[in-house]
Image: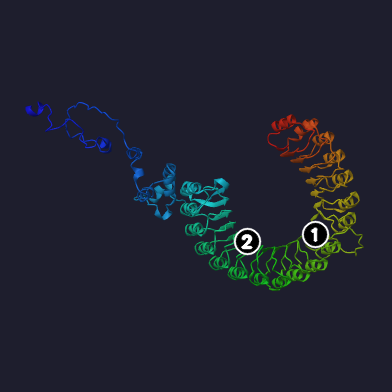
Amino acid sequence: MSKVLGFSGGDDFCPGGSIYANPKEASFFLPLGPQVDVYFPPRKRSRVNAPFVLDGEWFEQKQKTSIEGLPDECLFEIFRRLPAGEDRSACACVSKRWLMLLSSICKDEICAKKNTSAENIEKDGDDVEFGGEGYLSRSLEGKKATDVRLAAIAVGTASRGGLGKLSIRGSNMCRGVTSLGLRAVAHGCPSLKSFSLWNVSNVGDEGLTEIANGCHQLEKLDLCKCPAVTDKALVAIAKNCQNLTELSLESCPNVGNEGLRAIGKFCPNLRSVTIKDCTGVSDQGIAGLFSSSLVLTKVKLQALSVSDLSLAVIGHYGKSVTDLVLNCLPNVSEKGFWVMGNGSGLQKLKSLTVSSCRGVTDIGLEAVGKGCPNLKIAHLHKCAFLSDNGLISFAKAASSLESLRLEECHRITQFGFFGVLFNCGAKLKSLSLVRCYGIKDLNLVLPTISPCESLRSLTISNCPGFGDASLSVLGKLCPKLQHVELSGLDGVTDAGVVPLLESSEAGLVKVNLSGCTNVTDKVVSSLANLHGWTLENLNLDGCKNISDASLMAIAENCALLCDLDVSKCSITDAGIAALANAQQINLQILSLSGCALVSDRSLPALRKLGRTLLGLNIQHCNAINSGTVDMLVELLWRCDILS
């Protein structure tokens, strides 16, 4: 022992150097345990004549932590054993690599806890791995739509059942949404029920197939401007998402007949379908869809190259259809509408909208009226071949019609317009005539008939030929009007409007005279005196002959008025003051846009009106300076002010 203790340190026992052959590798070994006693005598430091340089690989290896060196397969096994949603979210924040790995874990791949009772699982809310239902909604637009953000949403919401509704509109130009992001959604959001994808060119069949395979509860699918999506994706959706109830396809050129046939075959609950501007869709696709979809209720076909055959299929198989929209179908002729009406399948149809279809003729529309006995709402837009005779025949056939809107039907004249009132008087509640240039104001001698007491709403908008003579007749025919819109009618004066107001017995609730430049204070005075006890909404925008006298009449008689628009009228500060001094008026919306005579002097009156105002428009009121506007914004803090 004395020899050992007295040993001075020769080279035979220990040279006094490091136990590692390479001193650079010393830090990679664990220290010796406390049970090992080893003595290292000191050694004189050797002189270094050259600089000591460490290579870059050693620095990279030195900085890298041990867990980062693990391959993805090992990290995957670790992550799928994490006990709670919060832990997964925390790990997802470490790096993009960890986030994408976590987002690739499916619900079925999560390791279940062992020896955990159901009672403990219910009590510990944080330990719920995946919720049962998805009630959260997210919408990504433009540059915010990236794969990384989708992965983060999928991981962050997974513990609460994932998303129930996801909308992606547009995409990041550099890092846009791809199938990788949709794969993350499919894995983390199995309860997804509504998915909308607009204007995303990088997503194709692979991404939609991931959604189909992972989101079996999908009920609503909306695809718009997705050129990379083909029938393959739609077939996958049909086979895996059989709870689908709503489908919308717009500007998807590579979606065609095969996909629609698959939807009809495998989705028995489909209730609503919209197909717009899909060049690959033809009669075969429409036939395959309708022949198998027994509960389809809402249908919209627009800008398609379908023919009369498609309308024949709809007329035969559309036994559950209640809402039908047909827009811009250039290859459909009169025969198509005639066959659809005579197909006896549209017995439940309640609403029909037809626009820019040359097949809407007198014969075709009459057949539709006869074949749809429960039709209540009809909107006819740009029907260039429809005349007065066809419109009257349709009105006679559609005995249940309650609302009719004619827009840009230039062959319709005054005879057709009043013919509708004569033949639909029993149930018609709303009649609208918009931009129909065939209307000419003629002095008609009408037969003695019972008035149309069912009509409650009348709209005549931008029909330059409509004048006082027509209004006088309307006043006699429609005594129960409550909503009246006479907008953009330069030929209408007090002589036509006042008799209409005097004939209304039920009490007008909403009146729109915007753009009637020849209407004066006399009309407003009559309106306030006769209907002030019911009037709630009054629009006088652009009526340049309306002055303070009208506002004084309103202030005195219209206690229920809540929405008033006097934009571009000849009112002054005195009129605003009269409104403010009214004892019972409770305005919520007031528009003074373009009233050049309203100045800063109206500040006290506007402040007083602000007790009830929720919206105030003072745009283009050049006599009101910016300081007054700032003061109004401060005083009327709960009112939205446009200036």
Where is residue 444? Give x, y as percent: 91, 61
Where is residue 470? Give x, y as percent: 88, 57
Task: State whether residue 593 is above or below residue 457.
Answer: above
User: Marks 1 and 2, Cα distance to the nearest angstrom?
Assistant: 33 Å
- Horizontally, residue 420 falls left or right of residue 48, namely right
Task: State whether residue 137 is above or below residue 362.
Answer: above
Q: Residues within 10 Å of mark 2 (few under 14, many from 20)?
A: some
Residue corresponding to mark 2: 274
Quarter occupied by the N terminus = top left
Task: State whether residue 302 is above or below residue 363.
Answer: above
From this viewpoint, is residue 581 visible? Answer: no
485 or 447: nearer the viewer = 485
Where is residue 176? Give x, y as percent: 53, 49
What type is the residue that disc 2 sits on?
Thr
Residue corresponding to mark 1: 454
Q: Residue furthest front?
A: 49
In primary-sequence order, the first of circles 1 and 2 is: 2
What type is the residue that disc 1 sits on?
Ser
How many numbered circles are shown?
A: 2
237 or 284: nearer the viewer = 284
- Horizontally, residue 35 falls left or right of residue 357, namely left
Residue 8, picture quadrant: top left
488 or 417: nearer the viewer = 488
| Residues at circles 1 and 2 in contact by the CB criterion of under 8 Å | no
